[in-house]
């Protein structure tokens, strides 16, 4: 009876250790990924970057990513405005060429 209890307890402990090890390596991979992304988004790391917690680093990367998205949106709207102005310039040029042709 005690042999079965000890065997069951050993299996449970082994499973808990396995889950912990898998979680540890998963977290390590995520931290490495955050570091690689942060090196792209934050070429100049803020002061105290090494001492920041994982959550603070993720928040900094998310903020930078949000700023990049905002800049992309602004860029797209500026491109649309430039295209609209180009069409307007072409229309004005055609109109002026028509007026010059009439003279």
Image (tube, rainbow, N blue to C red):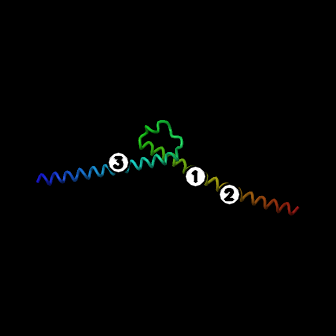
In what element is the residue under mark 3? helix
Quarter occupied by the N terminus: bottom left
Residue at the location (41% across, 50% down)? 29
Q: Quadrant of residue 84?
A: bottom right
> In the structure shown, which secondary structural element does the residue marked by tag 2 occupy?
helix
Q: Is residue 75 left or right of residue 14?
A: right
Residue at the (64%, 52%) spot, across then down: 78
Circle on res. 83: 2
Give how far across and how far down residue 61 sits, in percent: 48, 46
Residue 19 in percent (x, y) is at 30, 52
Q: Residue at x 56, y 50 (%)?
A: 70
Q: Which mark is residue 72?
A: 1
For label 3, the residue is 24
CA gap, disc 2 and disc 3: 51 Å
Q: Nearer the viewer, residue 80 or 12?
A: 12
Tell me, yes or no, whether the two marked residues, 2 and 3, touch with CB atoms within 8 Å.
no
Give the camera-side residue of 48 and 76.
48
**Label 2: how many residues lie within 10 Å, few (<14), some (14-19) or many (20+)?**
few
* Left or right: 10 as drawn, with respect to 52: left
Within the image, what quadrant is residue 83 found in?
A: bottom right
User: Which callout, 3 or 1, points to the residue nearer the camera?
Assistant: 3
Whichever of labels 1 and 2 marks the residue nearer the N terminus, that label is 1
């Amino acid at each position: 009876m005690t042999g079965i209890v000890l065997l069951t307890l050993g299996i449970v402990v082994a499973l808990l250790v396995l889950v912990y090890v898998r979680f540890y390596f998963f977290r390590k991979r995520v931290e490495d990924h955050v570091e690689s992304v942060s090196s792209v988004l934050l070429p100049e790391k803020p002061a105290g970057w090494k001492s920041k917690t994982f959550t603070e680093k993720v928040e900094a990367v998310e903020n930078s990513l949000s700023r990049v998205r905002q800049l992309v949106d602004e860029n797209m709207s500026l491109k649309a405005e430039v295209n609209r102005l180009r069409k307007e310039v072409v229309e004005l040029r055609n109109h002026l060429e028509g007026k010059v042709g009439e003279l």
